Amino acid sequence: MLKLLQKLTNCEFECGTDEAGRGCLAGPVTAGAVILPLNFSNDILTDSKQLSYSKRNALKAVIESHSVSYSFCHVFPEDIDEINILNASILAMHRAIDNLNISPEFISVDGNKFKPYNDIPFQTIIKGDGKYLNIAAASIIAKTYRDAYMCKIHEEFPVYNWKQNKGYPTKEHREAIKKYGITKYHRKSFRLLDEQLKLDF
C-alpha cells in the first residue's frame, strides 16, 4: 500500500475534507472535516473505500482521539433534490468545516469541485483520500457516520436493506423501490429505477 503524505502544505491547521454517499439513491450525503496534529502518522489509514468495516471503525476511534479537531455534517434528500447533489456535497463539506472548533488555515479537498469558504485558501485533489492523511481521515469520518445513519433508518424501512447497501443503487435496492415505492429518505431527483421501469411519484 502506498504510504500517504501527511498534508499538502506546511500550515499547522490544514483541514482535510471529503464526502460519502454522493451516488446513493437514499439517505444524506455526508461530509467529514479533520485537522490532524503535525506529528500524526498511521500506516493503515487510507481511502475509506479501500478498508474493511472493522478497520474503518478502528480508525474512526483513532482519528477522534488524536485529531486536533474533527466534525461531520449530513445534508438530507430534500436539500439534495432542491440544490442538486454536487452543491449538496459542497454544502456538507462547508458545514463540516463550520463545526470544527479551530478555523483552518488551509483546506485540502477530495475531488475536483469546491466553492470558496471564508476566504481560506484551498486545493482540490483528485483521489486525495488515497494521497493525504487528513483527507483520508475525513473520508473515514464521513463514511462511518453516514453508515451508522443508514443502519439507523434501516430499522424504519428494512425492506430496502439499507443496513447492507447503505442506499447505493444495488439491484436489490432498485427491486425494493419497484415493489414498495419510495420513502421520505429517497432522493426524488435521482433516477431511482432503470429507464425501462416507470415509477409514479
Image: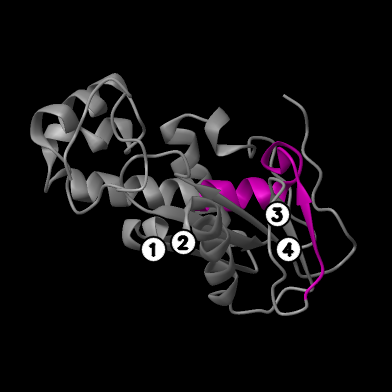
Residue 96 lies in magenta, yes or no? Answer: no
SS of the residue at dot 1?
A: helix
How far apart, in angstroms, are the residues tagged by discs 2 and 1? 6 Å
Q: Which mark is residue 37?
A: 4
SS of the residue at dot 2?
A: helix
How far apart, in angstroms, are the residues tagged by discs 2 and 4? 35 Å
Q: Amino acid at mark 4?
A: Pro
Could you tell which of marks 4 and 3 lies nearer the N-terminus?
A: 4
Q: Cβ–Cβ below 8 Å for labels 2 and 1?
A: yes
Residue 143's x, y, as percent? 46, 46
* Figure check: 190 above or below 145: above
Q: Which mark is residue 117?
A: none
Q: Amino acid at mark 2?
A: Ile
> Is 38 left or right of 65, judged from the image as shown?
right
For discs 2 and 4, the disc positioned in front in the rendered view: 2
Q: Which mark is residue 79?
A: 1
Q: Amino acid at mark 1?
A: Asp
How far apart, in angstroms, are the residues tagged by discs 4 and 3? 18 Å
Neighbours of disc 3 within 10 Å: few (<14), some (14-19), many (20+): many
> Is 30 left or right of 104, judged from the image as shown?
left
User: Which residue has dot 3 on it?
Assistant: 109
How far apart, in angstroms, are the residues tagged by discs 2 and 3? 20 Å
Q: Amino acid at mark 3?
A: Val
Q: Cβ–Cβ below 8 Å for labels 4 and 1?
A: no
Which residue is located at x 28 percent, y 20 percent? 196
Which range of residues does the magenta coloring cover?
120-141
Q: Which mark is residue 83?
A: 2
SS of the residue at dot 3?
A: strand
